[in-house]
Image: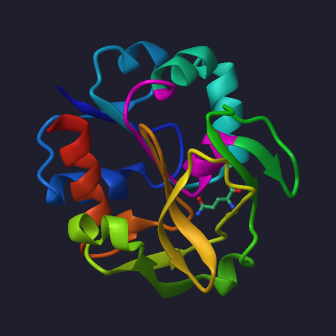
Amino acid sequence: MAVGILALQGDFSAHAEALRRAGARALVEVRRPEQLEGLAALVLPGGESTTMLKFLQAGGFWEKLRAFAARRPVFATCAGAILLARRVEAPPQASLGLLDVTVERNAYGRQLESSICEATVTPAFAAELGPKLEAVLIRAPRFKDLGPSVEIVAHAGGEPLLLRQGNLLAASFHPELSPDSPVHRWFLQRATG
Ligand code: GLN
């Protein structure tokens, strides 16, 4: 079964490359809601969440995407994670309400303050992901008010950067921009293995 990448806006091609490097064979760039049918899993890329929202709402995607993400494996990075959140701040905007967190947009500064840091993987996940991850932060959101079913997979400087909640995996950083992405491999194994 194929893995889809939402390809309305943002860095979807970098995700496609990262997934290919991680061993994915069947990839679908999703531009119409009907394309979600039959996919094993979906990636929501980084980019600009307000623009993605407009396309999602105008394209009749909203309910189909919500239904998909409510039960299938979804890996959301940065703007994608903002779309999944229960609540969005700075400023508030609509969201799918599936990931039980509040997201504060652009919390780590502007584009020029983009940075790369080393995130520490929580011991429970280190066997699968290794002890450290490179985290590329670009106008990244902050995850706050984590609900009881949200697990912190990786963190840096006291901030949660990679979260898991059941079928959902959400990163405030961009694993697709690092040369090696154990997170894509892990996602792929869990989603299609
Ligand atoms: N700041 C962007 C937003 O709010 C997200 C940035 C990103 O995806 N790198 O949508």
The front one of 85 and 112 is: 85
- Which corner quadrant of the image does residue 125 belong to? bottom left
Q: From this viewpoint, is residue 137 visible? A: yes
Residue 136 x, y percent position in the rendering: 48, 77
| Left or right: residue 21 compared with residue 102 | left
Residue 68 x, y percent position in the rendering: 46, 22
| Left or right: residue 117 compared with residue 60 | left
Residue 184 vertical position relative to residue 179 in the rendered view, above or below: above
Q: Which residue is drawn at the image coordinates 64% and 68% (left, top)? A: 140
Farthest residue to the right: give it: 91
Q: Which residue is drawn at the image coordinates 35% and 66% (left, top)? A: 124
| Left or right: residue 186 compared with residue 158 | left
Magenta-highlighted residues? 69-85
Q: Is residue 107 magenta?
A: no
Q: Quadrant of the N terminus?
A: top left
Q: Which residue is drawn at the image coordinates 64% and 30% (left, top)? A: 55
